[in-house]
Every structure is written in C-alpha cells, then in structure tokens.
Amino acid sequence: MTSLSRNGHLIDIRKVVKTYESAAGKFTALKGVDLRVEESEFVAVIGKSGSGKSTLINMLTGIDRPTSGEVIVAGTPVHALSENQMAVWRGRNLGIIFQFFQLLPTLSVIENVMLPMDFAGLYAPRERRARALRLLELVEMADQADKLPASVSGGQQQRAAIARALANDPPILVADEPTGNLDSKTAQSVFRLFEDLVRHGKTVLMVTHDNDLARAVSRTIVLSDGEIIEEYLSRVFPALTEAQLIEVTRELEPLRYPPGTIVVRRDEVIDRFYLVTRGEVEILVKRDEGREFVVTTMGRGQFFGEIELLSGGRALATVRAGPETGAELAALDRNEFQRLLETSDAVRQAIEQVARERAEEHMAARRRATAG
Amino acid sequence: MISPRWRKVLADLWGNKSRTVLVVLSIAVGVFAVGMIAGSGQVMTRDLRAQYAATRPSSGQILTQDSFGYGLVETIRRLRPVADAEGRRTVWARYSAGPQEWRSIQLIALRDYRDIRVNTLRSMAGVYPPPARQLLLERSAVPVVGAKVGDELLIETADGRQRRMRVAGTVHDLSQISSFFRGVAYGYISMETLEWLGETRDFNQVDFTVAERQTDKAHVEQVGALIRSKIEGSGRAVLFTFIFDPGKHWADNSLQAMTLILGVLGALSLLLSGFLVVNTVSSLLTQQIRQVGIMKAVGGRAGQITGMYLTTIVGFGALALLVAVPLGVIGARALAGFTGNLLNFEITGYSLSPRVLALQVATGLLVPVLAALYPVLSGVRTTVRQAISSYGLAEEGSGGGRLDRVIERVRGVSRPVLLSLRNTFRRKARLTLTLVTLTLAGAIFIGILSVQRSLIGVLDGLFQYWNYDVQLDFSRSYRIEQLEREALRVPGVTAAESWSFRSSQRVRPDGSESEGIFLIALPADTKMLQPILLEGRWLLSEDENAVVVNTDLTKSEKDVRVGDELVLKVGTREITWTVVGLVQGILSGPFAYANYDYAARTIRTYGRADRLQVVTERHDDAYVTAVSRAIEAHFRDLGLRMSSNLTIPQLRRMIAAQFNVIIFFLMIMAVLLAVVGGLGLMGTMSINVLERTREIGVMRAIGASDRAVVQIVMVEGILIGTLSWLIGAVLAFPLGLGLSNAVGQSFLNAPPAFKFSTLGVIIWLAIVTVLAAVASFLPAWNASRLTVRDVLAYE
C-alpha cells in the first residue's frame, strides 16, 4: 500500500512557486500551483513551451526545488530532502522516463534495468537479473536484453527505459515527453504500455505535446504561464482563450463539502456558479408529497447554478454532496460570472444553450417526479 | 580593449579553473624538475671545479711504510717533472664517541700550515694553524664527530695511549673523501702534537703535482714511478701509489652521472606532463567543436583558430613557468646545498642563470605546444557542417574491438562496478596516455627500489665475499701463530685467520708501472674469502707462483687474461706470476691473491702477518662490536700495535648510508613522477566526469546516492591505477635493469647483479591505489555534487 499525504492524496502539491533568477532578471515559472493526484490516475500535463510543465514535473521528482510551497509525494515532503536523500528516495518511489531515453551507453539493456536495483538495494542480488528480465518481458524487450542501447531502435530504447523506471516497483511513474522522439506508431504502443501500468495500479504523470494522447488519459492538467488552468473550466468554456481561463481560474473559490451535506437548498437565492472538481453532488427534486429524491448526480467537470444566475431566480433544486464521496467544488460569484459572459458572445451562447437544455431536463424530471 | 578572439582565450583559461590548475601544475612539476636539476647541476659543477682547482690538487699520492724526513720531500720537489710536493704524516687513532664507543679518526700532521704547496686547506672557524696539543677538525667531520670548536675529544693512539685534545677550529680539505661518505673523521695537528702523541716528527705520505702534461694520466703515472723509485732508493718501502683522474675531484664523475640520470628522469616527467596536456586539449576541443564550427562559419580561418587554441596552451605554459621557475630556484638551491654538504664543497651562491631560465622557458612552452598540436589541428580541421551537426558529447560508446568484447562479457559484478569497468575503457587514447604516465611513474619507482635491492645485493655479496666479522690491521707484522692463538682466546671468537698484505705495481711489458695493486697472501683453502669465480680456478694449496686477480685489476690493466704472466713489483723486487683465475671485484680495488706458503716466502713475510680476520659466534652489530673491543683490549694488553679495527656490520652501515644517498636522489624523481602521474589521473578523471555529466544526472534520477556516484568514479580511477600497476610491474624489470646498470656503472664501476624488488611492486600497489583514490576523489566528489537539474536540460 502506498503511503499517502496527510490529506490522503498520493501527490499533493501546495501553493508551489518557482522563481528563477538570472542575469536577465527574475522569471517565475510556477505561480502558486496547487495539484492533487490520486493513486492509479493517468495524468497528462499539457501546455505550450515555457508554460512550466517541466518545472512542475521537476518539483514532483525532486529534480528541482520550489521557491516556496510544499511538494508531498507518497507522504514524503520532497521539497525538504537533501540532494542525496532525494536521489535515494527517488530510486525507491519514482520511476522517471526521459524524452531521450537516457540509457547508459556502456551497459547492456538488462544491465540498465538492473542498475536502479543495485542503487536501491531493494532486491537480493540474485533476484535482480530475473526481475529485470520479467520487466523486459513486460515491455516486450526480453529478446534484446543483452544488447547495448546503441544497437536497438529508439522505440525499443524507450521500452527499456520504462522497464528501468519500473525496476524498484515504484508507485509513481513520471514521464517527460516519453513519446516526443518516437514515430506515431511506436508512440501509440508506448502509450498503451502506460495504460496497462495504470490498470495495474501505477500512477502515471506524463508531460506531452501530443493532444491526442492527452485526450486519451483519465485526467489532463493544462498549464499556462506557470499556472494550472482549472482542468474542467476549459471543457465548460471551450471558447475562452488561455488568458481568460487563467483569469477565471484565479477567481474560483474552492469549497469542500463532507458527504451528505447540503450545498444549495431549493428556493434559496443563488449567487454563484459551481463547478464539481472532485467527488460528486446529487440533485434532488421534491415530489408533491414533499419528499425529495435524486434525479441525477454530477461528477467531476460538471457544473450547476448557471440557470439561476442567467434567469435571476432561486434554486430550482437542492444540491447535496455525494453520500460516499463528498464534494469539492469551485465557485465563481455572480459578478465574475456575468463578466465572463460579457467577454464573449460565444461563451454566452454556449452557456445559455446548456442552461436551456438543463432547464428543459429539469422540467421533464419534475414532471416525471410528479407523475411518479 | 581586448579583441573578442583573445577574450575567448582568456575565458578558456579562466572559465574552468580546476582544469587550468591541473594542467598548469602538471607542466610546472616537469619544468620545476628541469630547473632544479639543470640549475643545481650547473652550479655544483661550477663550484666544485673552481674550489677544487683552487686547492692546487695533487696529481698523485704515495704512501710509504717507512717514514722519511723533510729532506726527501725537497729532493722530490727538485725532480724535473715534479711541479711541487708536500709531505704529510697520517696516523690512525680513535676518538671516544660515548661510553664504550670508539670511532676512527685520521690525524694528519703537516710541517708548515702557512706554506701548504699541494692540497691546500682553508680555515673555516676557530684558530689556524693548529696550536700545540690541539686539533682542527675537517668540516665534514664536525657532524660525524658531534663536536664543536672549543669541545674536548678523548683521543686514543694506536699504542693505546689516551690524550685529551681540544678542537681549536675547523678546516676545509677538499682532497679528502667527505667524512659522511667514508665514516672516518679527519683531524689536523702540528708536528709538536704528533710527537706528544708518541709518533715521530716525519712523514709517511707525499702528495705531488706534475709540471707538465697535467691531464695526461700516463705521464702522471710515470712521474709517480719516478718518485717511488726515489723513495725506494732511499731505502724506504712504498705502501701504495694513487694516481688521480687529472684535475677531477673524487666525486666529480659521480656528480656528473647523477645529474645526468636525474636530468633524464626530469625530462621524462616533463614529457609525461605533456600527456595530460594532450588529454585536456583533446577534451577541450571536443567540448568546443561547435564553437569551432561557429567561428569558422563567421569567417575564422583555420590558422586563426589554431592560433587561439595554441595561445591558450602557451597561457598554460606561462602560468606553469610562473609557478615552476621560482620553485626551481628554491629546489636547485636546496639540492645543490644538500649535495655540496654531502660531498663537502661549498655552494658559493645560487642565482637563476639565464641558461637554465631559457631551458625552462623553452621546455615549459614548447612541450605543451608540441603536445597540443595534434589535437588542436585535428579539432580545427573539422568542417562547419560536421561541427554544427555534432552534439558536442558524441559518445564513443563501446566499440567493436576485441578488448570491448572481452569487457562486455564480464559478468558477476554489480552494475555500478561494471559501469566503472566499462567507463575505464571508453576513451582508449586518453586511457593510454594516462596509463603511460602512471605506468612509467610506477615502473621507475619499482625500478629504483630494485636498484636499491641490487645495491644491497652488492653489499651482501661483499660480505659473503669477506666471510668474517672483524678485521684488525696491525702497525707491523706479528707472528701468525701468536695472532691467531690470542684471538681465539677471546670469548665469542670462533675462528681467526691472518693474511699478509703487500702493495705492488704491475710492471707492464713496455716497462711502465701501474697504479698500486694489493698482493694478498692467504691460505688457499681459506673460508674467510668466498670469491665469485668468473674464469679459471681458485688457488690450490700446491700452487706456487699462481695468482687469482679480480675484475678491478683487469679493468685498469685491460690486457691481463687468465693464463697470462703477470709481473708484480713488490718493493724493488719483480716477481713473475701466472694468472690462474679471475674473480669478481666488489668495491675493493685491484687485488691479486696468492697462495700463502709460496707468496709469503717470496715477499719475505713467512710466518708473519699484518692483518687478522676473525669470525664471531653471532653476527649482529652489538655482539660483533663487543667481541672486537674484547680482542682489542686483549691485544693491547699483550703489547700488539693495531692500526685499525673494523667490524663488518659497521662497514655495512657505512656503505648502506652511501647507497641510500643515491636512492634518496632517485626517490625525489620518483616522487615527482608520481605527482605528475597523479595529476594526470586527476585530469583524466575530471575530463571523464565532465563528459559524463549527463549520465551522472541520469544515475541520480534513477536513485544513485552521493556514495554510489563517488564510488563509480573512484572505482574507475582505482582501476586505472591498478592497471598501470600491472603494466608498470612488468615494465619495471627492463627499466630497473637499465637504471641499475647506469647507477652501478657510475658509482661502482660495474653493473651490479640485478635484483628485482618484489617489495617495490607491493609498495607501489599501495601507493598507486592511494594515489588513484586521492586523484579521483575530487572529480568523484564534484560528480556527486551535480544535481539532476544541472545536467538534464528539459526545455
């Protein structure tokens, strides 16, 4: 069982700021980033060049240190470790996969895989070769085990590098552009390998430029100019520019609700727009006899409150935090919401469209409830 | 305002300070060695020759058995081919060096200290000439005796009388072999004092100079023979004749030989430092290949770029000169001072001579530039396209060579060790140069210890040859029967044997006479002499006019062969012998051995002897010394007059001390070479770490701790060291043999039997391991300081 941070997250990055100082002046690569990742998530980190993707990944792997903020990975405050402690910790807890494979040229493929075991000393010397061979089988490289890296293809080198990353069975794999140097077919096969690993309980964080790959993973973190765009915001408001998304992200107020607590009560005046970021909420409609029942649940990336804000009315239904999961929400107040709608017609039209559909669904649900 | 081109040169020098320091130090060690040896050699030769010439050195010396008066000296002076002559009386005595410890002192009496014609003395301290009942010490004897001006010495003469004598002053006598080397002190006294000590006021030695053809040794020999016949004509027996190398101080040849040997080693260390330059420059060019391409792309001509890099190299050399020239002056002064002290001459002052400076500048600049020429030219020859498309650190990886295949097949060690092993062989040219440096340092170190072992072997041989423990010389002949009987009465003495000695000269077929040759009459079946027979046979008890000669004799009398007739003149009698055998001479001078019964009769000493050899029960220093004292006391009680008493362990210590001086000088060079080797290894390891920065970053990323990184780098360094040790141990054999022959030829007149030093091999393994560990620790530590972020550029 992987140890988790005190809040139960496998990876917990809090208010991380990273500022580089150079002769040219200060440059802030990360501006107070918060990020939480759970076990068995497959997370893609995307963003333009210079957006801070690699800096974020480096914070996570301990390759670089935050100027301020905390990075807690599998219960370890990575930011507080010395260089040496970091190297030892990394060897046991994290597998890193590089864009340029970075296999040591003088060691054979299998020796490269055994090397982290030698460093960490987690497996008995006699077991190491067999284990390395199993890992190479997993990445379909067993038949190339005794070759030198230079004599196998780039895709094969990357497979070997993945086997190496798995050498000490770390819970987390971090890959920086792992497919950046591969043709699309080879990239696909490497990606499927990651998916397999996730299915077997590994957590994978992958920086990528490849939007197709990014769409195929369970979660995408978008970085822009050193900040994480609230990951569902861009789905809700696809018409917004990155700059606008960041601005909105900054105005979002994070809210937490324990399981079963009420978020909004029917007929209350609603002055916020809510986005579900974690867990789920239940939408309850009252039957004629006065009993409320769940008409639908909303999960991550879904939102509510827009109908009321657009029509200026009171809450149409009660919203309650999921009984099992509770809910984490991001809320945008009325004024900001209005300003957002005013920024672009496309956004307004899109939201109004969703609101209309939702209102109709709602009426239908009530009718069903009344009929029921 | 410096142009950008030269600014880059400065930046290359200044930018990587540790690289610059390493290269500069390495060149500096070589330049320092050259400066030290050339500088000291020059000043030593200059001062020794000038000072020796100023003493009006004698061309030859004749020792007599019977003393003579001033009149004979004047007669000799008047001989036409003689420029001048000086009579001296030399007597052996002993001084008390502590309770129960007596050491030899030679007391020299001169007639007129104000008018010394040959081998002049120089007053150094205290009074001059020596007052009555006081003595002047030769200055090299001062530390040996451990007395200073004003102290009193207890002197015991040959007949056992003891006298307290004050040290009134010190003098410098360049004609004497320094007390340090000979283990004998010299004291100068007046004729009055001589009488007070119980001796007669006359001479037993004459030193002469020749009037013409001073550098013609054959002529000097003729003059020597003339003087000898004059002395013998006066009815006195001549003991021995020495003819010196004309105008040469006794240490001159050795000094020249030593300077030459050290000079060769110094040049070698400079050459080896050139290898580090090759490695450094190759790596610099590899790193800067893109810069070269860019410079070419913006219009830089190959000549200009070559000029820039060679200027960087000249910069290294210039910095090295800044360090090495002043250190060379200090080193030369120290070395000359030390040697002068040892050989008993004065260094009149050392200042940097323009010739030595020019040599240092030439070697300090030229060697690095020559070393750098190939890597620079081949780097600069790269085309713009090649340079810009190459990724700087193009990995050689493991090639397909046989060695690579062997190394790839190595199994059964952990990956970090495997990594060290394979990294070792990655850059083969660099490895080769580093190995050559360390290997030579090791081979020379082991070679020097082998020289030492061989010299000790000579000593062992010597003491096997002289198979006894104490040697007693008497002032006159005594009956053999008495000497041996009385010696055997002393507790601890297990055997005693007496021989008869006579000085002789060979009368060559052309009638000319040789230098002195010792004719030794000894029992043919003696157990006290174990000669190494080279040719012919040893003496038989029935032999009559047969002699066995040693190689020291055949060296000066080259035509003498086994089977030849040899005419030896003893006193005025010429005796014809047949040479039946040739034995190895060991530091003994020209000897001819003859069967006692026949020879003693021929030289009229039958039944009598003037030397006694004694074997003691145990052979350790303390025991032998104690027994020799007991014999001496016993003989004195019997009224037998001894002139010297020498124990073999004492002799051994003395000769070993001289050998150690030779070894000491050679060791200085071995240390310098080891330093160059260490710097070379450190340079190579630094370059390796620099080139493998990315790999080290990757290892950090996959969990290599500080220790693991340090270990990987250090194991590689130690592997190189061990490899160099292996090759060095093999190479040490021919190298040691050559060195041993050179040293033997210069100091013993013959190459010693070569003995390889296995201990040296083991010691060097320890040294090279430590050296490699130290040399690779800094680069290893730097490697462990690399953070992953430093080395893995992501964006």
Image: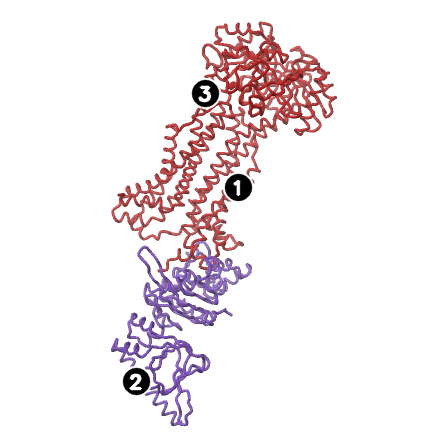
Chain colours: A purple, B red
The mark found on residue A126 in the picture is none
Query: What residue type is disc 3 on?
Result: Arg
- Identify the chain of the residue marked 1, using the numbered disc in the image: B
- 10 Å neighbourhood of mark 3: few (<14), some, or many (≥20)? some
At which x and y percent is residue B644?
A: 64, 19
Specify whether residue B595 is in view: no
Q: Is residue B656 above or below residue A239?
A: above
CA–CA distance between discs 2 and 3?
Answer: 118 Å
Q: Nearer the viewer, mark 2 or mark 3?
A: 2
Q: Nearer the viewer, mark 1 or mark 2?
A: 2
Question: Element under label 2?
Answer: loop
CA–CA distance between discs 3 and 1?
Answer: 40 Å
Q: Which residue is mark 3?
A: B49
Q: Quadrant of the C terminus of chain B?
A: bottom left
Q: Quadrant of the N terminus of chain B?
A: top left
Q: Earlier in the sequence, mark 3 or mark 1?
A: 3
At which x and y percent is residue B720?
A: 48, 45
Badge 2 and badge 3 both on one subunit: no
Q: Is residue B96 left or right of residue A23?
A: right
Query: What residue type is disc 2 on?
Result: Gly
At which x and y percent is residue A199?
A: 45, 72
At which x and y percent is residue A137?
A: 48, 65
Nearest the camera: B689 or B323? B323
Q: Quadrant of residue A352?
A: bottom left
Badge 1 and badge 2 both on one subunit: no
Q: Which residue is mark 1?
A: B767
Query: What residue type is disc 1 on?
Result: Ile
- Identify the chain of the residue marked 3, using the numbered disc in the image: B
